[in-house]
Amino acid sequence: MMEMAVEVMARSIGESRPDRKATPLVGAVLVKRDGTVETAFRGELRDGDHAEFALLERKNRAVRLDGSKLFATLEPCAPGSRKHPKLGCAERIVLARIKEVWIGIEDPDPTVDRKGIKHLQDNGVTVYMFDRDLQEQIRAANKDFIAQALERKEAAEAEQPAILSSLENPVATADLRDFAPDVLTRYRKLANLEESSEVFQRRLIQQGLLIVEGTKLVPSGFGMLLFGTSPRDVMPQAGLLGTIHYPDGAEEVRDFSGPMVLVPEQAIQWLRDKLPNPIDRSGAQRRATTDKFYELVREGIVNALVHRDYEIAGAKCQLSVTSDAIVIKSPGAPIEPITLRQLQEFNAPMLSRNPVLHYVFAKMELAEERGLGLKSMKARASEVGLPLPKYRWGSPYLVLTLYRTANAAAQAVGRRTLGLMSNSEKAGWAWLVTQETVNSKEYADAMRVPNRTALNHLKRFTQLRLLRRIGSGPATRYAVTTP
């Protein structure tokens, strides 16, 4: 249905507007309770009609849609986003008693910008986001619309910011002198903002990093997190707490409490100094492999800092290192409608809890502009031949485990489960934890066993709930679900 919505989107009819405002390409698919499917695209029946409006009001006005599912490539417009007395599409969806909506991408226009999603959720509608690959197609097709919408958003926020977090408010006890000058200089250079100080300050105001209070410029909470010399003085939840647990039982701790944009590199340098050979490699491969491993760790740290829930004031990001793994804890559950399973399967859609932080990290080339950097984490693990990183929820933390060896990941299932395996199955499981999905032939080739033996092993792992079967017949694949 998501793919169908994207296909329908391509048929959208643009409007000829005197203000040259780009109109989005939008496709919508309605799956009714009886299984019938209807579609609509923007401008299909009348110039300017939204796809959801055409689908719900023009094609199904007299039809009961209770329990139906809707798939729309763009976030439905929010209440108040259309001229009175027109209703927003999100309102029409609620009135139609549709209880499940799949959305392609959020609409960055300031009249919508997650407000449509919130209205649906506030009224009991379950919201999901499209798969990442489809989101990228939608963004590419709507490049002009998104660019203009972001310009309108920036202008609107400069006049009257829409508050998503308390950290967008000014820090009353701080002023511009609390910013680290060298870090601001680095940001100016990397973000191509090497302009006059007056213009640069205006940029920081527009980005929500500085707040104008009378004749003073006051850092916002996000500004202090990113550039503050000592952000924990005013926000105890800032920073990263690091602990290395050595095999002999000794521990070494370090707190990273300076400007957030420096923390990932500082933490990586600390680990490099203390763990010169973090994974078991030899010879000429060691240096290149180690570099890629640390890129994986850096991505995990960046995600923890940028996407955590800073409203949880009593918890801090944590970095814990053992001989088996590096564990990174980030306060807060995945932001709805992203699910833990989507993170675990590395296909979480693009959505940021803290867009201000994400924007600055992206401009400083420390993070991808959109999404959680899951693709690069997955790629780095594969490149160094390590198991895929594992996400789990341990309230109040989202916990990311980066295994340092395949054996460590294999052992993570516990002695009881390992005790139920034969020696050949244990060897097979040690290989499987470095994979995402496999079929029986791939397993047989890797382990050099007959296909019948491979099928028996895969069946056994599925019974132990270590694998999840996908598909049937010759197309069957097995997804690794633990540790």
Image (cartoon, helix red, strand yellow):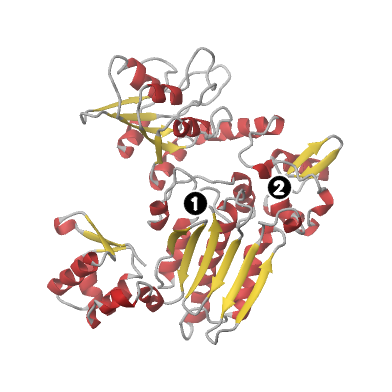
Q: Nearer the viewer, residue 400 or 36?
A: 400
Q: Quadrant of residue 147?
A: top right
Q: Nearer the viewer, residue 321 or 388?
A: 321
Percent from the top left, x then y, of residue 478?
Answer: 25, 62
Q: Which residue is mark 2?
A: 221
100 left or right of 179 in image: left
Which residue reaches farthest right?
A: 215
Disc 2 residue type?
Gly
Q: Are marks 2 and 1 in contact (CB under 8 Å)?
A: no
Direction from residue 237 to residue 44 in the image, left or right: left
Q: Is residue 191 above or below residue 154?
A: below
Q: Position of residue 80 (x, y in %)?
A: 54, 21
Above or below 243: residue 17? above
Q: Residue at x 35, y 31 (%)?
A: 99
Tell which circle, 2 or 1, labels the residue nearer the N-terminal end: 2
Res 200 label:
none
- Where residue 217 appears, x then y in whole percent? 82, 42
Residue type at numbered disc 1: Ala
Q: Quadrant of the C terminus?
A: bottom left
